[in-house]
Image (spheres, rainbow, N blue to C red):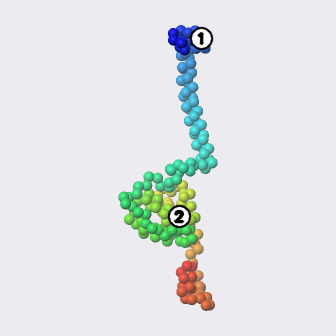
Amino acid sequence: VQPGFTSQQENLDDPKNAYQGSNLLDDVSKVNVVVPQLEEAQQKFKAIEDRLSMMEGGKDPLDLANMCLVPNVMLPPKFKVPDFEKYKGLSCPKNHLIMYNRKMAFFANDDKLMMHCFQDSLTGASLNWYIQLEGSRIRSWRDLANAFIKQYRYNIDMAPDRIQLQNMSQKEGESFRVYAQRWREL
């Protein structure tokens, strides 16, 4: 036997290293039982973690699936997002939808594209509203448009009626141009 090496017989003679055949089989069967139990425990632990995360409302902020309202949207070749007037949440949402639909008329049958590009027509609080939407609740362009109108309905209700417009008068010393502008903004 070369220096630094021991023979197999010497290893078997050492009580720490000697295994009888039946003991070795018993140990292997124990390992085979423990491994599936460990895997099952890990799966249960992962499921508990996932449920806890959902209850806490936590989503992985860097998970792209959580960032996109419209997953798997396909942009047409050479598609360029039109320039939209940005909605700030201060005017009639129906008028904004009308103007948006007119600019996107060519793509009106592509729900995913309509939904995806809508964010480009928003700014400020209305863009924050869009970002907070849950994909599980918004499944079509119609769903998104209805949610948008519902969110900004108060702007429709606040629109001046004919009587309010008729009762408005030009102030003393106010130029007609300033008066007309004030009337239009009402």
Give coordinates of residue 147: x percent, y percent.
53, 62
8 lies left or right of 16: left
Of the 4 image quadrants, the one containing the C terminus is bottom right
Q: Is residue 82 above or below residue 162?
A: above
For disc 1, the marked residue is: 14
What crowding class fits label 2: few (fewer than 14 Cα within 10 Å), some (14-19), or many (20 or more)? some
Q: Residue at x 49, y 70 (%)?
A: 85
Q: Which residue is outermost to the bottom?
A: 173
SS type, badge 1:
loop
Give coordinates of residue 153: x percent, y percent.
56, 68
Give coordinates of residue 183: x percent, y percent.
55, 82
Q: Give the mark, 2 or 1, whose residue is nearer the N terminus.
A: 1
Q: Is residue 73 above or below residue 102?
A: above
In front of the other: 23 or 159: 23
Instruction: Residue 113: name its quadrant.
Output: bottom left
Q: Residue at x 52, y 65 (%)?
A: 122
Q: Amino acid at mark 2?
A: Phe
Mark 2 or mark 1, which is nearer to you?
1
Residues at marks 2 and 1 touching, judged by CB atoms closer than 8 Å? no
* Visible residue check, residue 20: no
What crowding class fits label 1: few (fewer than 14 Cα within 10 Å), some (14-19), or many (20 or more)? few
Q: Amino acid at mark 1?
A: Asp
41 lies left or right of 118: right
For disc 2, the marked residue is: 148
Q: Residue at x 53, y 64 (%)?
A: 148
In front of the other: 134 or 177: 177
* Visible residue check, residue 38: yes
SS type, badge 2:
helix
Instruction: Residue 13: name its quadrant.
Output: top right
Give coordinates of residue 68: x percent, y percent.
50, 54
How far separated are the C-alphas under marks 2 and 1?
79 Å
